[in-house]
Amino acid sequence: GFKDHDDHALILPPEDSREIVQTMSSSGMPITDCLIKGFQLQSNHPSGGFFGPLCVSENFRNLLESHPPYVDPHSALAGGYSVNFMSYRKPHWNPDLAPTHLMDEIEKYKLLPGIGATQHFCQDLKIGLDLGWGGLLEKIQKYQDMNPDKTDFYQSLRNIVLGMQNWMSRTATYARQLAESEENPQLRQNLLDMAAMNEKLVTEKPESFREACQWFLWYQSMARMYNGSGSLGRMDVLLYPFYQQDKEKGILTDEEATFDLACLLIRDTAYIQLGGPDEEGKDVTNPLSFLVLEAAHKLKIPANVGVCVGENTDPRLLTRGVEILFEDKTGIPKFLGIDRTVEGFVRKGYPVELARQRAYAGCHWSAIPGREYTLNDCVKINFAAIFEYAYNEMMADESVEPSIQELWNRFEYHLGKGVEGIAKSLDFHMEHMHEVFPELVLDLLCYGTIEKGLDASHGGVEIYNLCIDGAALATVESALEAAKAAK
């Protein structure tokens, strides 16, 4: 049946090892999902759940090491994921840390407070491209030696990397096994090339364009499995040095690069930004920006590719994006008002150079890769619910004459209480998230998390930018206008 979920390129396990379940998505919505039948996780709590960095990482490592390998002989890239780790988390929050003191306001105002929300920020993949998995292990060890009191956290990060290396190594072996029985010489050579590439990437950093795309795929598959994370950031900027180098060597054509990109896009619907300014305001559009667009154009499947629109962005990229939008009629690409994004961040007191680093990283939001912790899209206040509460309270109060002004006064008061409830909830989340379900996968590619030995939700990064989505404001405005008209 249908999953009723975001468009993810999850490859279902074989039918005999597939278990269909009802669960909650990383955004807190009920979904249909599947598990690997027979796989068991270890609990460290009477509720049957597992909490804290060490237990979480050990369970995720076991899942990675048990995950079936997947190789498509027709693809340039190996690997694919079959399950969501979030679906194994029952319950999602440690009952011993229940926010009982906040529940009255949460329920009264129908708040989505963000407690336990995950992954709605953006790692910097450049860290991974520069270090590779072997380099990340060395970095973890270096800072563990400097912070011996954070041993559990560093061992947790190490578990994530070791599980990833195991999965990659088994996938490379599987590609070699497929090559032995492949009769088509071109496909056989492709399988052997994928095997060699992935054997190398288990420990070494990527050096070619294809290897960089493969590294992206592995990290994104793991991040999506772990907690639904779906951001790749400024892919045309990150991959351009590899593209330029291979083009200069004469070992890569634009057709091959487009195919590699298409193989990456078909494996997951990660959020990608094309074009936009660098720190000095210079547009970063390059030939690879157009190739990413062409890869999405050829696929014609869901792909969260965003084209920057702004005063200084390359108009050719916008033109090509609009052409593809009308030709394919798939809603792809999206268009990103980059100038307003920068202006809004600067209004909050941040330097413009920092504001320009923000990258498209989710449904309708952006983040500074590797430096900023946010809960974009996870924290919501429902204006209509607060309006309804204020209205019902006024009508039930026999000591006052109902009026627009009285209703507005009560709405304003309860809106303030709702915002206060959100603020207290966010404080609670920041105090406890690291000891319930830390951001271990994204922690690997952030600035400060490994260096400090702290989870991104608990002081590991530089910037904390927590916000609120407002829902149903138009409903409240319409109700007030109707009441004024009736009066």
Image (cartoon, helix red, strand yellow):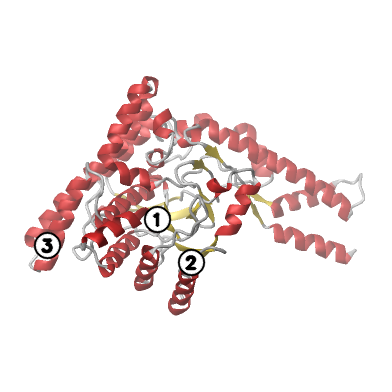
Q: Which label's residue is closer to the chain start, 1 or 2?
A: 1
Tell me the SS state at disc 2.
loop
In front: mark 1 or mark 3?
A: 1
Q: Which residue is mark 2?
A: 314
Relative to residue 439, is residue 278 depicted above or below? Answer: below
Tag 1: amino acid: Val
Position of residue 42 in the picture relative to residue 447 (left or right)? left
Residue 240, picture quadrant = bottom left
Tell me the SS state at disc 3.
helix
Position of residue 15 in the picture relative to residue 282 (left or right)? left
- Asked whether 454 or 474 is in front, the reply is 454
Residue 72, picture quadrant = bottom left
Q: Residue furthest bottom?
A: 327
Q: Decide: few, some or many residues near mark 2? Use Cα within 10 Å; few <14, some 14-19, many ≥20.
A: some
Residue 276 location (% of width, % of height): 49, 59
The residue depicted at 36 percent of the width and 43 percent of the height is 127
Please indicate, yes or no, whether residue 287 appears anywhere in the rendered image: yes
Tag 2: amino acid: Asp
As drawn, the label of residue 189 is 3
Q: Which label's residue is closer to the chain start, 2 or 3?
A: 3
| CA gap, disc 1 and disc 3 | 30 Å
Tell me the SS state at disc 1.
helix
Q: Which residue is mark 1?
A: 237
Residue 232 location (% of width, % of height): 40, 53
Position of residue 40 in the picture relative to residue 432 (left or right)? left
Q: Decide: few, some or many residues near mark 3? Use Cα within 10 Å; few <14, some 14-19, many ≥20.
A: some
The residue depicted at 43 percent of the width and 77 percent of the height is 328
- Asked whether 253 or 457 is in front, the reply is 253
Residue 108 location (% of width, % of height): 69, 44
Position of residue 145 in the picture relative to residue 75 (left or right)? right
| CA gap, disc 1 and disc 2 | 14 Å
